[in-house]
Amino acid sequence: GQAVLHSGQASNYPEFATKAFIVDGAYIQVDVLIIIAAVVALVAAVFYVLQRTAIGLQIRAVAADTDVAETLGINAGRVRAGVWICAGVLAAGAGVLIANQVPVDAFYVIPFLINALVAGIFGGLHRILAPIAVAFGLGVLENWIVFQFGATYNDVVVYGLAIVVLGVAPV
């Protein structure tokens, strides 16, 4: 409860499933598969809503041109509020999914935020699938770096690559 939240120490939350298996020498936790499945399902649901529903059409209209959307009778304030509420719910869900994978303290989310910013900038903040692909690529790169060189060089290589890419081809 309150003592855990305000103690200033990192907390570990229980796993969804404790089983794991080995595939070609790789140790795969069932927890990670659950997280991947949940993320894929949530991304597919968001993509479906944005591309195939009337609400998604309203969201895209407000994002493209608020004045025209309001002229067409769309309540832009309500649409924006709904998008922020949904974003908050999805962020809370992401926090629940990731909490059992990392020790949770006051600053545990900073590396995730920086990586999300890098993925958003390189993938394009106005797109859906490109930032997800960039984030996936960053995750693969980070894991490869940790495997090859150790965790010490992880941030240096990822952020160095980001600086080089931004210097060569500004987005």
Image (spheres, rainbow, N blue to C red):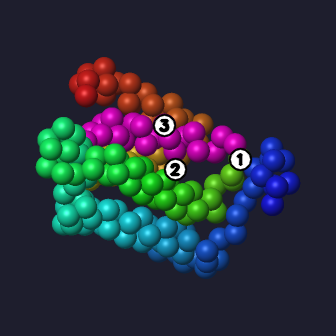
The three-letter code of the residue at mark 1 reads: Asp
Q: Nearer the viewer, mark 2 or mark 3?
A: 3
Residue 121: quarter of image = top left
Residue 27: quarter of image = bottom right
Measure the alpha-carbon separation of dots 1 and 3: 17 Å
Q: Is residue 79 left or right of residue 52?
A: right
Q: Nearer the viewer, mark 2 or mark 1?
A: 1
Looking at this view, name the residue that lies furthest to the top.
167
Q: Position of residue 12 (x, y in %)?
A: 72, 59
Q: In the image shown, does 63 or 7 lie closer to the viewer?
A: 63
Circle 1 — which element? loop
- Image height of 22 relative to 107, above or below: below
Residues under numbered marks 2 and 1 in contact, where contact means CB atoms less than 8 Å apart: no
- Image height of 134 relative to 93, above or below: above
Looking at the rendered image, the quarter that the C terminus falls into is: top left
Query: Which residue does the numbered mark 1 point to in the structure image?
Result: 105
Residue density around tag 2, few if under 14, some if 14–19, many if 20 or more, within 10 Å: few
Q: Position of residue 58 (x, y in %)?
A: 22, 55
Q: Which mark is residue 114?
A: 3
Tell me if I can see residue 140 in this picture: no
